Amino acid sequence: MDVNRSGGYLGRMNSSGTRKKWDERYRGTEGPATPLEVLTDNAHLLPASGEALDLACGLGGSALYLAGLGFRTRAWDLSRVAIDRLRRRVATEEILAEERDVLAHPPDPDSFDVICVGHFLARPLCPRIAAALRPGGLLYYQTFTEDRVDDGGPGNPAFRLRRNELLRLFPDLVVRLYREEGCVGDVTKGLRNRAQLIAQRAP
């Protein structure tokens, strides 16, 4: 189970039981955090500087990547273990990592120039994520789809995107990149099991 990627897994709920589950999972995870592919493969679209958020950050791979590019970066996750591990890796001013239930405490409007969300899906939160972008701000989103070629990702279909759903979750943003290959063609190649979106709030 891949919990190293920014954003952990889908469908984390607001409960002490869920927090405990993710604390245990991150406690047993080894190796470095890795940023989202949608971010690293398309970093040329990023602004030169600004405020960034890695939402539901897990071990903070995308936060570390953004901070390395010079962004003033916040990293939020429900798991105290994940946040503590991230804090031990970074200098005091490099990333502001916070244990935070994003469903109960979503980002404020007009707060960020870049927001990354990976392997996390809370549909009611999507309008708040879009509103948290400043004019011209970019959303980088990557998570699991119902169409898949193997058993990777969550077993509950409610926590997987339906076909083209990620486009519909952010109707007021301008799409700059969308990728969802499903099971078409040679499934040993390409992006499978996931969808990627980069979308921009109108300047």
Image: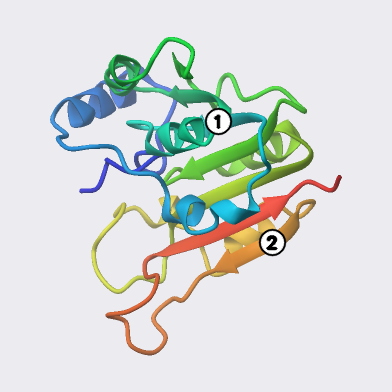
The C terminus, quarter of image? top right
> Of all residues shown, which one is farthest toward the top?
92
Mark 1: secondary structure: loop
Q: Is residue 81 above or below residue 55?
A: above
For mark 2, does the 10 Å Cα neighbourhood hold few (<14), some (14 to 19), or many (20 or more) residues? few
- Residue 134 in percent (x, y) is at 77, 34
Q: Which residue is mark 2?
A: 176
Q: Position of residue 194 (x, y in %)?
A: 42, 62
Which residue was labeled with disc 1?
70
Which residue ends up furthest to the right in the rendered image? 203
Q: Quadrant of residue 65?
A: top left
In the rendered image, residue 171, in percent from the top left (x then y), is placed at 75, 55
Residue at 50% x, 70% y is 180
Q: What amino acid type should be assigned to the residue bearing mark 2?
A: Arg
Question: Measured along the vertical axis of the image, is residue 48 above or below residue 184?
Answer: above
Q: Nearer the viewer, residue 118 or 69?
A: 69
The CA distance from mark 2 to mark 1 is 22 Å
For the rendered model, the colour scheme is rainbow
Observer able to see residue 56: no
> Is 185 or 47 nearer to us in this picture?
47
What amino acid is labelled 1 in the image? Gly
Q: Give the residue at x 51% y 42%.
A: 117
Apparent side of residue 195 relative to residue 18 in the rendered image (left or right): right
What residue is drawn where x is 29% and y is 37%? 33
Decide if residue 21 is on the left or right side of residue 36: left
Q: Residues within 10 Å of mark 1 (few under 14, many from 20)?
A: some
Element at label 2? strand
* Pointer 2 or 1: first along the chain: 1
Q: Residue furthest bottom?
A: 185
**Location of residue 21 (image quadrant):** top left
Picture disc at residue 42: none
